[in-house]
Image (cartoon, rainbow, N blue to C red):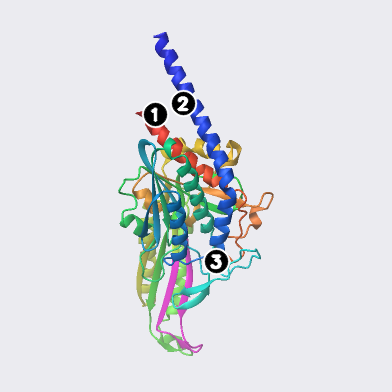
Amino acid sequence: MQKLLTTFALACFSLSLQAQDLQAQISQKAAAILPEVIKWRRHLHQHPELSNREFKTAEYVTAHLRSLGITVQTGVAKTGVVGLLQGGKPGPVVALRADMDALPVQEKVDVPFKSTVTAEYLGQTVPVMHACGHDSHVAILMGTASVLAGMKKDITGTVKFIFQPAEEGPPGNEEGGAPLMVKEGVMDNPVVDAVFGLHISSAIEAGRIHYKPGAAMASSDWFTISIKGKQAHGSAPWNSIDPIVTGTQIINALQTIVSRQANIVEAPVVITVGKFHSGVRNNIIPEEALLEGTIRTLDSKMQQDVHQRIRRTAMQVGAAAGAEVKVTIDTKTLVTFNDSALVQRMVPSLQKAAGAGNVATMSWVTGAEDFSFYGTKAPAFFFYLGGMPKGADPRKAPGHHTPDFYIDDSMLDTGVKAFCNLVFDYGQALRAKK
């Protein structure tokens, strides 16, 4: 018995030394690749492409993956790229995702790699900028591929690199993004056992990682409320059914869903009307009005309940005014849900990457991410990586999707280390169970 215990202890000690050696290799290789990661990120920043139009970005990624000997599939969900790296030991399939698209935003930040690109968007010529940090996501995953390809023999299982287009939403009526990636089988052949993703943050200090178990980011629904009234001269409103007044009443009533109906102790709810179209002349009460907005919820049951309340509220306010009202709700993303068991198991991997003192939990975010669709196919974990210059005030950090968006890319290797540690630790944990 004593001999058996001694053998077991030696085996555990040997595994511990191997794990320490792998972690040291990851740190060294990530640090060595950092200059390249920064170079890739700045190249992509200077050459941004809009959703479903990431042709050059896809070529850039494909060339890099093939140079590493990684099997590559292109044209997934229009411009997506998927790489497959088979490790030296049998084990699970771990997917890592980066989004590639930029936004129709004109950059104001004066950096040497500033974007001056323009492109066509919905029939208009628009400026294009990586105003949400997807350039850094792509560069981090390219760096991760470099490190893991160099450690291939030590990997337990298979790594699937997902470079996804159109996270910001495909233009017009096109399909795209994570829903189309999933539809075209990115989580199959081979079947993914766990999927990880990250997002850079301009308001979290560089080198830090924040995460939240369970519901982490909101679902995103877009709604349209069309109101048909009766046109009349502005001097005789009693002859009209005024869609503008009805629309304002609907807007006010929608806010009572948040303030008086939804149980926001369970989860936050946001209802925002962002567009109000009506009228052509100042002395004519028009026949029609159109409201458009977004709904954010962090609970799927609450999401459906809010949908019903919006429909009922708008219809009844319209009926009271004598107007015809139609409500359309289009779900763009689901709640981004971090599998609690997976989070608990993998947080130590993030702590290895950033240091235990630099990893912290966060509150839920009412922004949305189509990464949520991957979580319908496998346990998922999505976390935030800091990109704010050290010592800066997060309250003054330029927001995402703004012309002033800026990140410090000097510590993007933290993201590379995080992804690499997640791959190794997940595979070894499953192997140890067996």
Which one is nearer the viewer's eye here, 26 or 235? 26
Q: Which residue is mark 2?
A: 15
Picture quadrant of residue 427: top left
Q: Is residue 391 above or below residue 344?
A: below
Tell me which label, 3 or 1, sits earlier in the chain. 3
Q: Is residue 281 magenta?
A: yes
Q: Is residue 194 above or below residue 284?
A: above
Q: Is residue 337 visible?
A: yes
The alpha-carbon separation of the residues under discs 1 and 2 comes to 10 Å
Local crowd at mark 1 within 10 Å, few (<14), some, or many (≥20)? few
Residue type at mark 3 is: Met
Q: Residue furthest top?
A: 2
The percent position of residue 31, horizontal first and vertical second, equals 59, 44
Which one is nearer the viewer's eye here, 284 or 20? 20
Q: Main secondary structure of the magenta part?
A: strand
Q: Is residue 57 left or right of residue 410?
A: left
Helix, strand or loop at disc 2? Answer: helix
Q: Quadrant of the N terminus?
A: top left
Picture quadrant of residue 395: bottom right
- Identify the residue at image location x=39%, y=71%: 172
Residue 129 bears which disc, if any? 3
Tell whether label 2 touches label 1 (CB within 8 Å).
yes
Tell me which label, 2 or 3, sits earlier in the chain. 2
Q: How many marks?
A: 3
Q: Is residue 292 magenta?
A: yes
Which one is nearer the viewer's eye here, 392 or 68? 68
Indicate which label's residue lies in the foreground, 2 or 3.
Answer: 2
The magenta stretch is 270-293
Residue type at mark 1 is: Ala
Residue type at mark 2 is: Leu
Q: Which residue is mark 1?
A: 432
Q: Is residue 234 above or below residue 211?
A: below
